[in-house]
Image: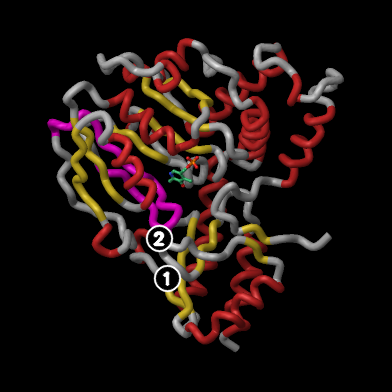
Amino acid sequence: MSKVHNYSAGPCILPQDVFTEAAKAVTDFNGIGLSILEISHRSKDFVAVMDEAITLVKELLNVPEGYTVLFLQGGASLGFLMSAYNMMPEGGKGAYVETGTWAKKAVKEAKLLGNVEVIASSADKNFNYIPKGYTIPSDADFLHLTSNNTIFGTQMKDFPKSDIPVVCDMSSDIFSRSVNVADFDIIYAGAQKNLGPAGATLYIVKDEVLGRVKRSIPSMLDLKVHAEKDSMFNTPPVYPIYVAMLNLRYMIKEGGLEAQQKKAEERAALLYNEIDSNPLFEGTTAVEDRSNMNATFVLTDESKKDQFDEMWQAANINGLKGHRSVGGYRASMYNALPIESVQVLVDVMKKLNS
Ligand SMILES: *Cc1c(COP(=O)(O)O)cnc(C)c1O
C-alpha cells in the first residue's frame, strides 16, 4: 500500500499506532469480549479510560492544581458560546481579539450574552497577521484569544500579558507546544486537530470559573455542572475520548510536548524555507506570525496551477487545497505528520521550479 501524505486541516492525521490499537478495541476492548462501542460509559473499564485521559492531559500540559479537565461535546463551535456563558456576567463585557474566521464566530456567539468589544483585529489585511500592542480594557470581564488561526495560517507566538481572565480557543495548536496553563481561565479545543477524532471537546478550566457568573446557565452549557459530574452529566463521546487517550499516551511516549514542539518547528522550517527560496511560491502571512501548524501559500505564476496540482496529487499528497477565503494552498502539519511527508511536498515544489 502506498503512503498518503495527509495535510488535511481537520479532522486530520493521527499516528498509525493509535489507529491500530483503536481498531482492536472496536472488536474486543481490553480483552473483555465486548466492543468499546457497546459498553456503558459508567463501566469500570471506560471510567478508567476517562481518568487516564484526564491524567495524561494534566501531565502533558503541566496543568497546575486548581484546574479541572473536561471532555465534552459540541466542538469548539459550542465552546464559543459556552465560554461566554461561563465568563460573562449579566451586563458584563468580553474583550475579543479578532484574528480570523473562528475568532469572528466566537464574537458572534458572545454577543448573544453581553457586550463585546473587539479590541484588536487583523480583518483589514484578510487576517494575514496577528495584531500586537493593543490595550486590554481593565473593565472587561475577560479576554478571548485564538492561539492559532487554522484558516489564515497565523499563530500567536506569545500571548499578551493580561490583568483580566483569559479564555483561549486552542483547537488547532494544542499539544504542539508547551503553554503556561496558569495564564488562562479557560482553554478549549475541538479534539480533531491535534488530539483525536472529531466528537470530543477538551476544556481546561480554572476552578474559580465554576459558578462565578450569577446568570442562569442551561445545564449542558454550565461548566460547573459538567465538572461536578466528572464529564458524565450526559453520555460522553466514549470512542473519541478513548482514541484521544491513546494519542495522549503516544505523545508522552514520544517525549511529551518538547518533542512535539521540536518536530513542529522542523516541519515548518523545512516548508517555509522552500516557500521563501522558490520564486514560484509566496507565503500569504506576515513572516513573524507564521503558524507552525497551518502554512498558507500561493503560486506566483497562476499558469503553473494545473501542473502543480497534478504533481502533488501524483506524489500521494492529500488535503493541500487552501480554504476558500484565502485561496491557494494550505499545508496543515499537525503532530502526527512525519517530516518525510513535508520533504515529499518540498521536492514537488522544487521540481516545479526546475
Ligand atoms: C476547527 C476549529 C474550530 C471549530 O471546531 P469545531 O470542533 O468544528 O466546532 C474552532 N476554532 C479553531 C481555531 C479551529 O481550528
Q: Based on the displayed image, in which of its 4 quarters is residue 64 positioned? A: top left
Residue 118 — which label? none
Q: How far is disc 1 from disc 2 in space, using C-alphas?
A: 9 Å
- In the depicted structure, whether residue 204 falls above or below residue 233: below
Does 111 sit left or right of 337 as displayed?
left
Asked which secondary structure carries label 2, the reply is: loop
Tell me the quadrant of the picture where the C terminus can be found. Answer: bottom right
Residues 322 and 202: in front is 322
Is ligand 1 closer than 8 angstroms to the Cβ of mark 1? no
Check the image and report above or below for 218 versus 316: above
Q: In which quarter of the image is residue 164?
A: top left
| Kind of residue indicated by mark 2 | Arg
Residue with the mark numbered 1: 283
Q: Where is residue 8 in the image (x, y as percent from the top left)?
A: 59, 56
Looking at mark 2, is its residue's CB closer than 8 Å to ligand 1?
A: no
Marked residue nearer the N-terminal end (1 or 2): 1
Q: Residue at x 55, y 45 (%)?
A: 193
Which residues are drawn in magenta? 138-160
Please give the residue where the numbered disc 2 appears in the rendered image. Answer: 290
Which colour style is shown? secondary structure
Task: In this rendered view, identify the residue nearer to me: 49 or 37.
Answer: 37
Determine whether 113 is above or below 124 in the image.
above
The residue sitting at the front extreme is: 112
Would you say the magenta stretch is mainly helix, strand or loop? Answer: loop
Residue 188 visible from this viewpoint: yes
Depth check, front residue: 94 or 108: 108
Tell me which residue sits at (35%, 50%) in the image. Answer: 156
Locate residue 205, reporting x and y percent: 40, 24
Q: Is residue 299 left or right of residue 306?
A: left
